[in-house]
Amino acid sequence: MDTEEALETKAEQALLEIEHLVSGAHEVEFDVDGRTVSLDPSEELAAYLERQAEAKGLDEATVLDLYVDLFARVFLEDEERPPNAPPKD
């Protein structure tokens, strides 16, 4: 898998996980342009990000970025995981 395809796959996995947890969706609409990912969130996710952004004093894009970083790490291969990470089930 080339770098672009890998980035798109990881982005899709992370965004779908976030969208599913918030709205129950099983699909996500997004675009990848180089290393920039654009998301068309559901109404539920957009409202959630707005609430989280207000509560934390951040903008919505930063909140989503933090969630994507968190969920993207879930899909790393074992050799890429930090040595102190708990074992994957």
Image (tube, rainbow, N blue to C red):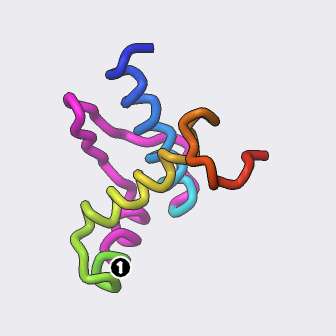
Q: Residue at x 30, y 46 (%)?
A: 39
Q: Residue at x 51, y 39 (%)?
A: 13
Count of residue discs? 1
- The answer to whether 35 appears left or right of 85 in the picture is left
Give the residue type that dot 1 points to. Arg
Q: Residue at x 41, y 52 (%)?
A: 68
Q: Position of residue 80 (x, y in %)?
A: 54, 36
73, 19: nearer the viewer: 73
Does the magenta segment cover residue 69?
A: no
Relative to residue 19, is residue 78 depicted above or below? Answer: above
Secondary element type, mark 1:
helix
Q: Which picture quadrant has residue 21? A: bottom right
Residue under label 1: 51
Magenta segment: 23-51
Q: Position of residue 35 (x, y in %)?
A: 23, 34
- The answer to whether 65 appears left or right of 79 in the picture is left
Relative to residue 16, is residue 19 depicted above or below? Answer: below
